[in-house]
Amino acid sequence: MKIGIMGGTFDPIHLAHLEMAHAAKEQKELNQVWFMPSKIPPHKRERKITAENLRLHWVELAVCGKEGFLASDFELKHPGITYTAETLERLKRKYPEYCFFFLLGADSLFDFENWYHPEKILSYAEILSFCRNG
């Protein structure tokens, strides 16, 4: 099974998130895209973030009725700061037979080398990056 992971704060989720996920699903022939709100994003610790249950609800509403799009509370169940490398490691342990693709905007890709263990991310998932603003 080919699974796209769309992580983020989703404060709020918006059309660009859905468009990126749709493009990834079509171009890479993904079976599903899991939208995974972050519990405590490490790069936004100093910023006020909307309550996680509300952000998850927004994601659920946004993906409702969209084939192959699922809202996931996987990161929200994990205590503390959520690092992509650790999330993907937990996903790979839970679903060893799945092939994961991690979706992110080009602006995040430009800073990817500064993420927490980018080499681990690359070992657990293929990166799919999308340009913003066209």
Image (spheres, helix red, strand yellow):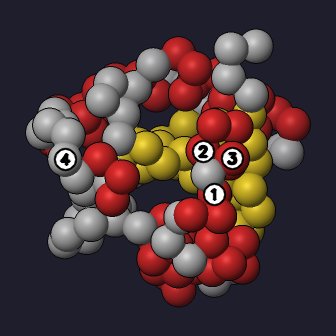
Q: Are marks 3 and 1 in contact (CB under 8 Å)?
A: yes
Q: Amino acid at mark 4?
A: Glu
Specify the amino acid type for callout 3. Phe
Instruction: Give the residue number, with chain letter if any, for mark 2.
Output: 108
Q: CA distance from mark 1 to mark 2?
A: 6 Å
Q: Which residue is mark 1?
A: 112
Circle 1 — which element?
Answer: helix
In the image shown, does 48 or 67 lie closer to the viewer?
A: 48
| Amino acid type, label 1 | Phe
Residue under numbered circle 3: 110
69 shown above or below 19: below
Q: Residue at x 74, y 42 (%)?
A: 129
Whether residue 2 appears in this view of the structure is: no
Pointer 3 with pointer 2, Cβ within 8 A? yes
Distance Cα–Cα, label 4 vs label 3 = 22 Å
9, 47: nearer the viewer: 47
1 and 2 marks in contact (CB < 8 Å): yes
